[in-house]
Structures are given as C-alpha cells and as structure tokens.
Image: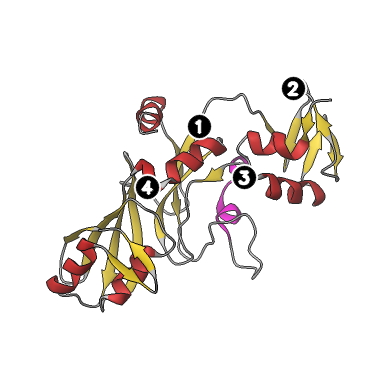
Amino acid sequence: MGIRLAKFIADCGVASRRAAEELITQGAVSVNGKMIDTPVFFVEDSDKVSVNGCEINKNEDIKVYAFYKPINTMTTARDPMGRKTIYDVLDKKYKNLKYIGRLDFKTTGLLLMTNNGDFARKMSLPQNHIERTYIATVDKYTKQALDIARRGICVDGINYRPMKIEEIDEHNLRITVVEGKKNEIRIVLKYIGSPVKALHRISYGPIKIENMKPKEILEIDKKTIDLMLKNF
C-alpha cells in the first residue's frame, strides 16, 4: 500500500507532516505528473513526487546551503499577515529547502537551509550546543549590565542561558548563544537597558557569512557537513 503522501513529503525534509497536508490541499503536490489534492493518498518508492514543480527524494544526500536573509522577510513558507517571506526572494529551485531555526522579520544575515528535515531538527536542538554568533547594534550599554547577560537571567519567567558577549565598540556587540530561544538576544538586551537597533547573524556552527551579499545562497561542501554531523 505504500506510505501516506504527507509522510513521504515530511520524510524528505520538505515540511512537517501537517504543513505537507496543507501543501497537498493547496494543489502544490503532484505524483507521477498528476496533481493530488487530498492527503488520503499513498505512494510507493517508485513514484515520482513533486512539490511546487520540483521532484523530491527522501533518499538523497544531505545538502546544506548558506542563505543571506535580507531585512523585512519572514522565516516561514506563508505569512498570514501577507509579509514577504524568504521563499519570495529565493530562486524557485530552492523552494523545497527547509530552514534551520529562524531569524525574525528585522534580523539579517546567515540562515542555514537544507533538504533534510532530521538534520534541520538536530541542528536546532539546544542540547547539541551549536553556537550562533550575531552582531547587535544598540544605542548604549554598560559593562555591569552586560555582565548580567553573561551570567544568564530570567525574564518574564523564562530562563536564558549565559551569553558570550564581546564589546566591539560603543554601539556594537558580538554575541554568541547556543540555545536559540525566540528573540532571546532582543529580549535579554532590552531587559538590561540596551534595546537592539539592528541584529545580524554572522555564523552558525562552523559556517560563516563572510562576504556574502543579501539574498545570496551558497551550497556548503560535504567536508563541512560531515563536521557538523559529528556534533550529534
């Protein structure tokens, strides 16, 4: 009988099973060239499944890409408020990639993307202690306040782990975190009296943004991917 179409799509790392069901009902999925509009559909390994016109394969090698997320884009496939998403600026051939973690609407910089859902999940897990480094621009800060963030704090009942913070100049800080909680840098810096004016991610694990330009996407070499897999 095979497996449900939505599960096949999820196994390929394209989307969660729930999101895959939405893609199916929206008419974005075809099997052997025929559009399927019901999640109650089963496929075999020999079937050719396409999402948004691109064939997917759950047996393909892990691929990872570095994407320079521009400002004012949502890290999501669809935004209920109609705001521009990363998939609106990506070339069509990358539409089936899954993002690793998120960057908020105003945050720019390095966003990793992959064809493998399990890899994306493991790269985001706090227990894997994968460092993400940002440049945060603020109006002002004090060394005493930064020390509070360096020790770890609790804001509105949520605990935030200690942050590595390097003072670049009077307005810019290099901040490294490993947990990846939603808006954690913005929340913590606001709490200590230094609200963020601009936030830019420059690295995720061993991958650095370096000289990339906004909207640019580059494939990561296998050696680097193998290095990341050793963290799991």
Q: Are marks 4 and 2 in contact (CB under 8 Å)?
A: no
Compute the Cα span from label 3 to label 1. 14 Å
Q: Nearer the viewer, mark 2 or mark 1?
A: 2
Overall secondary structure of the magenta section = helix
The numbered disc on residue 63 is 1
- The amino acid on which the numbered mark 2 sits, given as a three-letter code, is Asp
Q: Nearer the viewer, mark 4 or mark 3?
A: 3
Helix, strand or loop at mark 3 = loop
Q: Nearer the viewer, mark 3 or mark 1?
A: 1
The residue wearing badge 4 is: 212
Screen quadrant of the N terminus: top right
Q: Where residue 96 appears, x then y in whole percent?
A: 62, 42
Compute the Cα span from label 4 to label 3. 20 Å
Residue 51: quadrant of the picture: top right
Q: Which residues are magenta?
A: 85-95
Up-down: is 217 above or below 192? Answer: above
Compute the Cα span from label 4 to label 2. 38 Å
Q: Are marks 4 and 3 in contact (CB under 8 Å)?
A: no
Compute the Cα span from label 2 to label 3. 22 Å
Q: Is residue 88 magenta?
A: yes
Compute the Cα span from label 2 to label 1. 21 Å
First in residue order: circle 4 vs circle 1: 1
- The amino acid on which the numbered mark 4 sits, given as a three-letter code, is Met
First in residue order: circle 2 vs circle 1: 2
